[in-house]
Amino acid sequence: MFAKNANTLFQDVIKTYHIANTVEQAFINNYDKHTHLIEHLLYRKCWIDTVQWHYEDDIRDPQINPVEALSLKRKIDASNQDRTNMVEYIDSYFLEKYKHITALPDAKINSESPAWAIDRLSILALKIYHMNEEVERSDASEAHIKACQEKLDILLEQQIDLSKAIDDLLYDIEHGRKYMKVYKQMKMYNDNELNPVLRSQK
């Protein structure tokens, strides 16, 4: 049930973004963090992913001005950091939610936290949206549309499987069958003390 609601929310974010369809548009969160915290976090997370999706498109322009490319690379770096931060906020939500659960003696830890699985679900929603755009292109060849439809079918199947896996993971955590830990990403390249290039500029 959680994943179904997340998928619906992600679709809403992506459709809302594409009304203006520009990375420069103002971000407005449809959910109040005090009354709908997880929805607030998911909305923000997917918005970051959607903006970065279009950054990644733009920077691959072979005719891009080098100065513009460098500026865009900085924006992608900042977006990646925001994305990581949001994942950790979402995991903090689940840690708080399940802090009173006592893990069973034979409980196991999952290979990834709930939020990193949700991160993949958000990216998958973007892939589905844009692959569907390719399927609906009126100027594309029949072969292109057919190939994209086949890819879209696979993406939709992946969404079903990943959604079930996320719901199963949350169910297992809630019932003590699995437990979660959150290891901070500890990214070094953005840290003034850990990145030797940045440290040398101080």
Image (cartoon, rainbow, N blue to C red):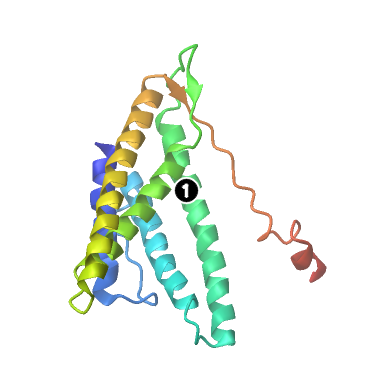
Up the image or down, 158 lies above or below 98; here it is below
Q: Is residue 79 above or below residue 103?
A: below
Q: Position of residue 124 (x, y in %)?
A: 35, 53
Tell which of 137 and 53 is nearer to you: 137
Viewer-closest of 191 and 177: 177
Q: In the image, what residue occupies the spot 64% across and 53% down?
A: 187
Q: Label 1 amino acid?
A: Val
Q: Residue furthest front?
A: 143
Image coordinates for residue 106, horizontal then vertical, percent: 49, 13
- Helix or strand or loop: what does disc 1 sit on? helix
Residue furthest to the right:
200
Q: Residue at x 51, y 85 (%)?
A: 64
The image quadrant where one finds the N terminus is top left
Examine the image and state in which quarter residue 55 appears.
bottom left
Asked if 50 appears above or below 176 in the picture, the reply is below
Residue found 38% across the figure and 30% down from its top: 169
Residue 88 image offset from top left, x and y in percent: 50, 46
Q: Report the residue marked by disc 1.
A: 87
On the picture, is 24 further left or further right than 88? left
Res 193 → quadrant: bottom right
Q: Can you give x and y, in whole percent of width and height, for residue 151 in the image? A: 29, 56
Q: Is residue 65 left or right of residue 137?
A: right
Is residue 163 visible to us here?
yes
Front one among 182 and 144? 144
Q: Residue at x 56, y 66 (%)?
A: 77
Quarter containing the C terminus: bottom right
From where the camera sits, is residue 35 visible?
no
